[in-house]
Structure formats: C-alpha cells, structure tokens
Image (cartoon, rainbow, N blue to C red):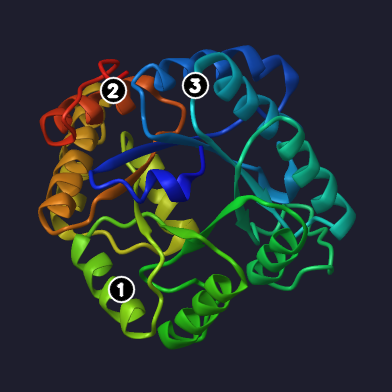
Amino acid sequence: MRISDVLKQDRVTLSFEVFPPKKADGLDAVKEATEKISALHPDFMSITYGAGGSTSRYTVEVAAHLHDVYGVTVLPHLTCISSTRADTAMHVREIQDRGLENIMALRGDIPADGLIEHDYAHACDLIADIKSHADLCIGGACYPEGHPESASREEDIRHLREKVDAGCDFLTTQMFFDNNILYNFLYRIREKGITVPVLAGIMPITNAKQLSRSVSLSGTHVPERFRSIVDRFGSDPAAMTQAGIIYASEQIIDLIANGITHIHVYSMNKPAVAAGIMQNISDILGYGPGSRT
C-alpha cells in the first residue's frame, strides 16, 4: 500500500521506524525485534539506511520480510550522499522487484570515512531522479528547528519546497521535544505553500546517553521540564524507560489534540517502548497493541 493513501484516511495514524543490522550476524535479532513491533499493527514501518549506505544490503531485506511475511506497509530508506546514479537505480529496482511501493529519499549523514559521491548535491536531486523513472510514493525529511547546515530557517524552508516540487509526497520531521516548535514550523511552511502531509517524528528517550547523543547530532532544543526528568530518572534504567515512554506519549496526545494526526515514532528497535506508547494512546487510536486487523 502507498503511504500517501494511508495518510488520506480520516483518522490518526501511527508508524514506527526501525533500523537494519550492521552485520549479517545481527540480522536474526533485528528481525525478531521488528516482528514484535509489527505485531502492534502500526500503519506502516520505515527501515533506515546507514550512513554512507553502511547497512544498505539489509534495508530492503528487512522491509521485504515485514511486507511479505507479516503484511506490513513498509518504507525503506535510501540516502544519496555516498550513492551514484547507478547505485540509486539498482536500489530502486530492487525495491520495485520486491513489490514494495514506498521509498524515503534522503541526503544522509556524511560517513565517518568522509567518502562521498557527487552525483547528487541535495535530497531534492535524489527525489527528482527517482520520480523520473520509478512509480513509487516518495517521502522526505524536514527539520522543525532548521537543518543544522542551513544558514537560516527561511533558507531551509526554500530547500524544503524544492523537495516537494521535485516529487516528494509526504514529509517526516526530525525529532523534537517541544510541540510548540512543530506548530510554529507547520504555520511557516503552510504559508510558503507546502501542503503535503507532515508526520510528526517522536523520539522516546529511554536513557540519558541517548539524549546527549541525539542533541549533539541534531541540535534539538530540550525543554527544562524534560531535562529535569532525565536528571531525576536518568541513573535508573527502568525508571527512565518508563519516564521516556510517558513523556513521548504525552507529546503525542497533545499533538493529536491540536490537530496533528500523523505520528511517526523512532522506536530504536525496542518493542517494549513501541508497545508502551501504543498502549498509552490506544483509546485515541481506536485500537490497542495487536488488536487491529
């Protein structure tokens, strides 16, 4: 199923992001975790593509497994910073050959070895290339607080409009911990004529190191209220896990109350975290973990 069709339905949608293994010996564990998350019956699951394509060989494998065995609508990722046009064509052909209908098109992070290709300057170039020769539903990324490499938020929104004009069907936000940031962002992009669906990206923080790592990579603003939660519970793994699930659930409830109906959770391959969030918002969704057919 195309994700653009999922998003047209007049209801709240909930999706989860997972990541493939870095090496073959981790594939079984990843499949087990993703299978447990798929048992919650999310509206779709996205499968990431490591920096520089480091996990690319497993991205489609995990996606196709979830699709073929469990009937999950899937969104395999593709990054272009280390891809040639030939690489992209091969990856897109593999997605189509496996009967998948969606792709998340991203520039991607610069790999640790610094090796990059120059066939694509930006994600909009990748989106346009895919659109020119493949009939796929294409997702893209957006940054409510501005891309770290953009000179200004205005410039970032101009680039976002270029993605949409190139053929992006929907957008998923970078994580944020203050919903007001998203509300302001949506107001600004709608003013600029960007009308495609936007999925709110929620990252449940379940340990203090995870927060530090996430903030250092993205520069995401952390409200004092959430910092206090991490300071109080960060040294107790079980307590921090529950606090992180509750904070993310409260974010989602507030988003839905304010008319944001498409929620994407960065589950980090943690079935218990995904299930906790699903349980907390099951009455709003109209179904609970594993209950939807």
Distance of mark 1 from mark 3, alpha carbons? Answer: 31 Å
| Position of 117 relative to 189 (above/below) | above
SS of the residue under disc 3: helix
Q: Which of 34/95 is in front?
A: 95
Q: Residue at x 24, y 28 (%)?
A: 278
SS of the residue under disc 1: helix
SS of the residue under disc 2: helix
Neighbour tally class for label 2: few under 14, some 14-19, many 20 plus, Cα within 10 Å:
many
Neighbour tally class for label 3: few under 14, some 14-19, many 20 plus, Cα within 10 Å:
many
Q: Which residue is drawn at 50% across and 84% down?
A: 158
Task: Please state the horizontal and vertical placement of residue 267, each as a whole percent of the image.
Answer: 40, 34
Q: Which amino acid does label 3 sit on?
A: Thr
Q: Which of 142/247 is in front?
A: 142
Please give the residue where the numbered disc 2 appears in the rendered image: 275
| Residue occupying the far right of the picture | 86
Please give the residue where the numbered disc 1 appears in the rendered image: 185
- For the C terminus, which image quadrant? top left
Please give the residue where the numbered disc 3 appears in the rendered image: 34
Task: Please state the horizontal and vertical placement of residue 96, each as a whole percent of the image.
Answer: 72, 39
N-term-proximal mark, 1 vs 3: 3
Task: Please state the horizontal and vertical placement of residue 31, each as a whole percent of the image.
Answer: 57, 17
Q: Which mark is residue 46?
A: none
Q: Can residue 56 be seen in this view?
A: no
Q: In terms of image quadrants, where is residue 220?
A: bottom left
Q: Residue at x 63, y 50 (%)?
A: 136
| Position of 111 relative to 146 (above/below) | above
Q: Can residue 184 be seen in this view?
A: yes
| Position of 8 relative to 29 (above/below) | below
